[in-house]
Image: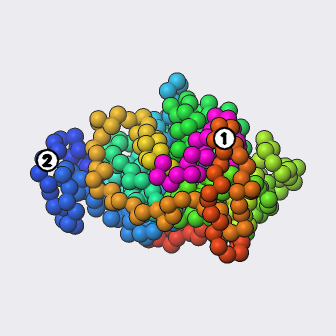
Amino acid sequence: MIAAPIIALALAGIAAASPTPAATTCADGTIVANSQCCFWANVRDRFKNEIFLNVCQENVHSLVRIAFHDAIGFSLNSEKGGGADGSMIQFGATELNFHANEGIDFIVDFLQPFADTVGITYGDAIQFGAAVGLSLCPGAPKIQAFVGRPNATRAAPDGTVPEPFDDPEKIFARMADAGFTPTELIHLLASHSIADQAGVDPEDSVLGAPFDSTPFSFDSQVFLETMLVGVLFPGSGPNQGMSSPAVLAVRRVTYYNVLSGEVSSPLPGEFRLQSDKRFTVHNQTACAWQENALSQATMASNFQTAFQKLSLLGFNKANLLDCSEVITTPPPATQKQAFFPPGKRHVDIEQGCATKAFPTTLSTAAGTPTPIPAVQVQDIPFGRRKK
Ligand code: HEM
């Protein structure tokens, strides 16, 4: 259970105190303009040391995923939950059973005890945690961090989280219902730059199979690599996820099957979601996808704007405390420009954008093609993700 008195104190502090104009030095040496953010500087450090182990690896990836799944439980048009309110944890008994949330329980296994121990609400743990996590990823933008979300009051209903086997129109409609255009969705999907799968194909050989060849860098590789022609399935694909072997047997097709969440990928070890691939060629998203593939800086800045909007769904930022000042600046991108992985070239690009050709200037990395290694789980004091 959540440590209610500690949270009440933290929230009361937010409401009562007014921002101080002079700089304050927190106990840990962090200098802040708003002294209330000292509490959050400490939470930041605990996140880094106890959850992320100071690297942009599996637990950061997990936090960014739950940040989306929790926040998108929101609608401009009907009752679909309170947005970025932590209901995914508070009402986990309901929401974690939804098909699209497969694997989120493992995140909750460590995030819930952490939030309870530190004394923060689940909504803040998810969104502040994602901002701190992203600050460890080379190439990520610095995410603004607003805190002070009260506890969730109700569960989101089923069906708010898009599935990789949904067709693009269905996904666009769901995102529009929550206030996002197809272009903003593509901007959010920069997150798949630091992503892997465990539930779409549950086979051991592809647990942690990443969506691009650089899953520890928040870079534009995922946009480029998803545009490459698919040539193989890294595991037993194509898979929808959570399906029995008998069901999978009848779903073995090669491309764009309405029942499959997976399509063929360009590189051994790399996993490709059907939805991501379809966005690369859809007339509403192909050019935004290509734009992100071609500019690391544009991709990061697009994501920053879209992710901030996501993290505030259901809330008015005027009612929250802005502690963005405690979020550290992420390391710079390791590559300024996406590159073709060894063995791939311009001819392997499947052009989707009708108005701009993919340039022929990108280089191919030296070396021979080798399988992309899986992302490993991290052992942390708050429990272990049991993929
Ligand atoms: C069309 C919308 C989306 C679909 C269909 C989708 C689907 C998926 C699927 C199937 C996985 C693999 C989960 C697993 O097997 O463990 C995944 C992973 C992930 N997704 Fe998405 N996603 C979407 C949008 C987003 C957005 C908007 C974000 C964040 C802003 C996001 C962040 C992530 C991250 C970080 C992971 C990796 C998690 C990990 O490695 O533990 N996704 N997504």
Residue 201 seen in render? no
- Measuring 60% from the left and 45% from the top, which residue is drawn there? 289
Real-space Cα separation, disc 2 to disc 1, in angstroms: 50 Å
Q: Is residue 288 found inside the magenta-colored segment of the image?
A: yes
- Measuring 74% from the left and 56% from the top, which residue is drawn there? 348
Query: Which residue is farthest bottom?
Result: 367
Q: Is 304 positioned to the left or the right of 193 in the image?
A: left
- Screen quadrant of the C terminus: bottom right
Query: Which residue is farthest left?
Result: 22
Label 1: how many Cα within 10 Å (few below 14, some 14–19, many 20+): many
Mark closer to the chain start, 2 or 1: 2
Mark nearest the camera among 2 and 1 is: 1
Q: Residue 315 carries which label?
A: none
Q: Any atom of ligand 1 within 8 Å of the CB at mark 2?
A: no
Quarter of the view holding residue 173:
top right
Q: Where is residue 322 shown, x and y percent of the image?
A: 28, 45
Name the residue beneath numbered marker 2. Answer: 20
What type is the residue that disc 2 sits on? Answer: Thr
Q: Residue 353 carries which label?
A: 1
Which region of the structure is painted magenta? Answer: 276-298
Residue 338 seen in render? yes
Main secondary-structure element of the magenta-colored stretch: helix
- Measuring 24% from the left and 53% from the top, which residue is drawn there? 37
- Measuring 85% from the left and 50% from the top, which residue is drawn there? 253
Quarter of the view holding residue 134:
bottom left
